[in-house]
Amino acid sequence: MTTFRAFLVEKNEDRTFTRSVVDRELDDLPAGELLIDVKFSSLNYKDALSATGNPGVTRSYPHTPGIDAAGTILESAVANFTAGDEVVVIGFDLGMNTSGGFGERVRVPAAWAVPLPQGLSLEEAMILGTAGFTAALSIHKLERAGMSPEGGPILVSGATGGVGSVAIKLLDQLGYEPHAVTGKEDQHEFLKSIGAREILSREDLEAGSDRPLLKEQWGGVVDTVGGGMLFNAIKGLRYGQSAAACGLVNSPNIPASVLPFILRHVNLLGIDSVEQPLAEKIEIWGKLAGEWKLTGLTELKKSTLSLHTLSEAIETILGGEMVGRGVVDLSL
Ligand SMILES: NC(=O)c1ccc[n+]([C@@H]2O[C@H](COP(=O)([O-])OP(=O)(O)OC[C@H]3O[C@@H](n4cnc5c(N)ncnc54)[C@H](OP(=O)(O)O)[C@@H]3O)[C@@H](O)[C@H]2O)c1
């Protein structure tokens, strides 16, 4: 098969962007050591930015987004992979300026591919996807910084979103007490069903932004939103605890002072799933397939998307209205 179906974003002369499902040629794909038959992808916030022309994510169009892909190798130019191997590709340049997982084929460097870990199916890997991987990476880094269930409740912002919902479920399974921050009043039951013990509104978390410090509450923070909400969460950390910053849906800026850092000995940890070295990616995927394998993982799959329903879902995630994970099934 030299043609394959793909979701394509095109830039128009008036600088608007058009999204459609088209047939593309294998020759449209960049050079790379692995040609992969993509079975599943997933929708992440960054894909919505790529699909709407955000130059910080994608510079050249026409382009097929999709920062996640899971599938079977069709052709390999390297010895450590052979045709038929199942692999997961997340991050690096996939779906940014390299044609991504919203197409039936991707061609990538072998150094981007993680062998599908035993214990996860291709679809389960994409229920997690970059969002789930980032939640796990955040918890992994927080634990290395000393976070433990005895340290106090863990605050998770953007709780109904992809990163937030996986973080809550994983923290609950690991014996923590996750507290969820959400803007969606109609999703409290969902949040409780995946393990949230307490639910705060965004306004709750924004309260006290004029105060230098807040009551010591949190044994850790997984923050997906940035802005004043992140700094208020830092001001509410217990002595010596840490916050992991992985997102910016509220704001990329933090209105901050050094006071919590020098008076409470707290830490702000950076989380990047994109350029993280392959060996560390393999370690986190191994955890997600093994000791951290989520029971009831499919509860997080709130929508099954096809290439044809992606466009509408992109508007949903951009509007902050996404709940849980949206998995793209390329067979649909
Ligand atoms: N660092 C990394 O490697 C990495 C990896 C993956 C994702 N990210 C980033 O993490 C963030 C979340 O990604 P995602 O895929 O989980 O997105 P998502 O599914 O859209 O989740 C984001 C959630 O944040 C909340 N939210 C939306 N707008 C908000 C606002 N203006 N103020 C406060 N909360 C708001 C909403 O949840 P509620 O309604 O429940 O509040 C929304 O569902 C994005 O910024 C993404 O780029 C970073």
Image: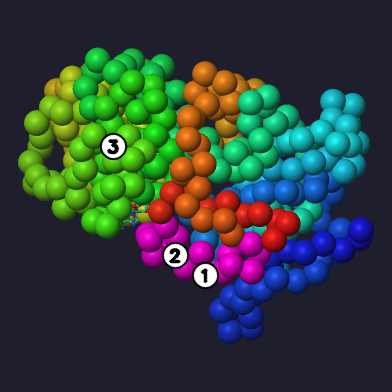
Residue matched to label 3: 196
Q: Are marks 3 and 1 in contact (CB under 8 Å)?
A: no
Mark 2 residue type: Thr
* Nearest to viewer (mark 3 / mark 2): 3
Q: Is residue 267 visible?
A: no
Residue drawn at point x = 62 percent, y = 55 percent: 328
Number of marks present in the image shown: 3
* Secondary structure of residue under mark 2: helix
The quarter of the displayed image where residue 117 is located? top right
Residue matched to label 2: 316
Residue drawn at point x = 58 percent, y = 84 percent: 14
Q: Position of residue 46 (x, y in %)?
A: 52, 54
Q: Are marks 1 and 2 in contact (CB under 8 Å)?
A: yes
Depth order, front residue of 153/190? 190
Mark 1 residue type: Glu
In this rendering, the answer to whether 42 lies above or below 136 is below
Q: From the viewer's perspective, tell me whether residue 181 is left or right of residue 247.
A: left
